[in-house]
C-alpha cells in the first residue's frame, strides 16, 4: 500500500487493474486502518476516474456474498448519499411505493456515513432484521414484493471500512460505489447522484451493463428528485431537464423535506408518510421518485401513468401493506 500511496501522492491515477487490486487488498484486510484512511482521502482531493471506479466496483462484486432471488426482475432505488442535505429517507420510502404498485424490489442500503439516518438505520428501527440468506430474502420478495440488502453483510470490504467512513464523516468514493454493487443485480435501477460529474460517470458505466436505468440529479445538489429545483434526468435513451411541476405537480422548499434529528425521529417521519399522514411536499417528493422508478421498468406508457400508479399505491395503503408484510416476516 505504501508504494501505491506514494504513486497517488504524485498526482497519478490508477489503472483499472491497480484499482481492483487495491480494493481487493482492503477487502482481504491486507492494510491497516491508517493506510486505508490515507487511500480514501486521496479521492477527496480529486475526481475519481472511470477506470478507478470500474476497478473498485469489480473488486467489490468479486468479493461479495451472492444472492439468488430466482427469476424475479427486481428494481432498486438508491442515491449515492453524501449530498449534505439531511432529507428524510426518500429512496427507501419510494421503494415501498414501487412495491405497492406491484414491482418487485431489492433495496440495497447501508447505515448513514454522512447523514443521521441512512436506509439501514431506518429499516432496523422499523423492525427489519438484516440477513444474507437467499431463501429468506426470496420469500420476502415473493410475499411482500420487497427485500432489503444491508450492504456490509454482502460486502466484507464495506464492513471493514464502515468505522473509518463514520469517523471521517465526509463523502468518500464508497458513496459512489454503493449504487453499483447491489448483489441482487437489479434489472432496473433509479440512481440519484450529488453532482453532474458523477452523473456522467454513472451514465458511462451503466450503459455498459445493458440494464434499464435512470440517473437523477437535482440541480441544487440533491441526489434524488427533491422538487426544490429542476432535475437532470439521464436514461438509456437520452437526457432531459425536468421541472418540479412536471415531476411532482408542485415545487417544495428544502425545509419541507428535512429528515429527523435522530434515527427514531427519521423512522417516525417514514411511518407518518407511508401511513398516509405525510405533508403535501413529503408525499409529492416520494411519489415523483417512485414514478420515475416505475417508468424505468418500461411497464408504463408515460411518466403520468407511472405517477398515478404511485399515487394509488400510497393512497390505497398498498405500500403500507408491503411494509407490514415485510416486518411481519422477521
Image (cartoon, helix red, strand yellow):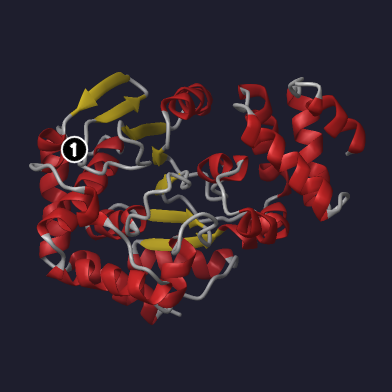
Q: Nearer the viewer, residue 21 or 40?
A: 40
Residue sitting at 23 percent across and 64 percent down? 319
Q: Is residue 191 above or below residue 267?
A: above
Residue 79: give x, y in percent of width and height: 42, 45
Q: Secondary structure at mark 1?
A: loop
Residue sitting at 50 percent across and 43 percent down? 179
Horizontal side, residue 321 vs residue 125: left or right = left
Quarter of the image for the N terminus: give it.
top right
The reply to whether residue 261 is in sight is: yes
Q: Nearer the viewer, residue 176 or 131?
A: 176
Q: Is residue 122 above or below residue 250?
A: below
Quarter of the image for the C terminus: give it.
bottom left
Residue 275: give x, y in percent of width and height: 18, 72
Residue sitting at 42 percent across and 72 percent down? 263
Q: Which residue is mark 1?
A: 300
Horizontal side, residue 270 vs residue 196: left or right = left
Q: Splitting the image into 4 quarters, where does residue 94 fall?
A: bottom left
Q: Which residue ends up furthest to the right in the rendered image?
A: 3
Amino acid at each position: 500500500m505504501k508504494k501505491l500511496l506514494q504513486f497517488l501522492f504524485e498526482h497519478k491515477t490508477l489503472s483499472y487493474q491497480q484499482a481492483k487490486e487495491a480494493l481487493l487488498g482492503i477487502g482481504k484486510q491486507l492494510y491497516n486502518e491508517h493506510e486505508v484512511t490515507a487511500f480514501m482521502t486521496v479521492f477527496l482531493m480529486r475526481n475519481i476516474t472511470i477506470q478507478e471506479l470500474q476497478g473498485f466496483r469489480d473488486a467489490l462484486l468479486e468479493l461479495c456474498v451472492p444472492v439468488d432471488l430466482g427469476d424475479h426482475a427486481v428494481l432498486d432505488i438508491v442515491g449515492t448519499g453524501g449530498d449534505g442535505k439531511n432529507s428524510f429517507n426518500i429512496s427507501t420510502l419510494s421503494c415501498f411505493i414501487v412495491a405497492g404498485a406491484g414491482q418487485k424490489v431489492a433495496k440495497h442500503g447501508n447505515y448513514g456515513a454522512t447523514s443521521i439516518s441512512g436506509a439501514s438505520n431506518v429499516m432496523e428501527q422499523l423492525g427489519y432484521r438484516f440477513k444474507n440468506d437467499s431463501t429468506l430474502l426470496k420469500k420476502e420478495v415473493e410475499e411482500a414484493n420487497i427485500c432489503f440488502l444491508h450492504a456490509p453483510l454482502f460486502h466484507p470490504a464495506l464492513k471493514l471500512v464502515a468505522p473509518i467512513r463514520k469517523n471521517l464523516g465526509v463523502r468518500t468514493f464508497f458513496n459512489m460505489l454503493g449504487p453499483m454493487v447491489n448483489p441482487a443485480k437489479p434489472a432496473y435501477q433509479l440512481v440519484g447522484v450529488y453532482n453532474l460529474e458523477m452523473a456522467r460517470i454513472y451514465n458511462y458505466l451503466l450503459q455498459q451493463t445493458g440494464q434499464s436505468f435512470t440517473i437523477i440529479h437535482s440541480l441544487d445538489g440533491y441526489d434524488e428528485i427533491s422538487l426544490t429545483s429542476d432535475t437532470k434526468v439521464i436514461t438509456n435513451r437520452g437526457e432531459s431537464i425536468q421541472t418540479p411541476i412536471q415531476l411532482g405537480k408542485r415545487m417544495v422548499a428544502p425545509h419541507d423535506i428535512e429528515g429527523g434529528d435522530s434515527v427514531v425521529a427519521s423512522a417516525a417521519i417514514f411511518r407518518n408518510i407511508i401511513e398516509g399522514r405525510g405533508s403535501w411536499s413529503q408525499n409529492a417528493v416520494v411519489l415523483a421518485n417512485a414514478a420515475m422508478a416505475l417508468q424505468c421498468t418500461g411497464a408504463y406508457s408515460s411518466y403520468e401513468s407511472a405517477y398515478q400508479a404511485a399515487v394509488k399505491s400510497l393512497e390505497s395503503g398498498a405500500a403500507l401493506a408491503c411494509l407490514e408484510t415485510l416486518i411481519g416476516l422477521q
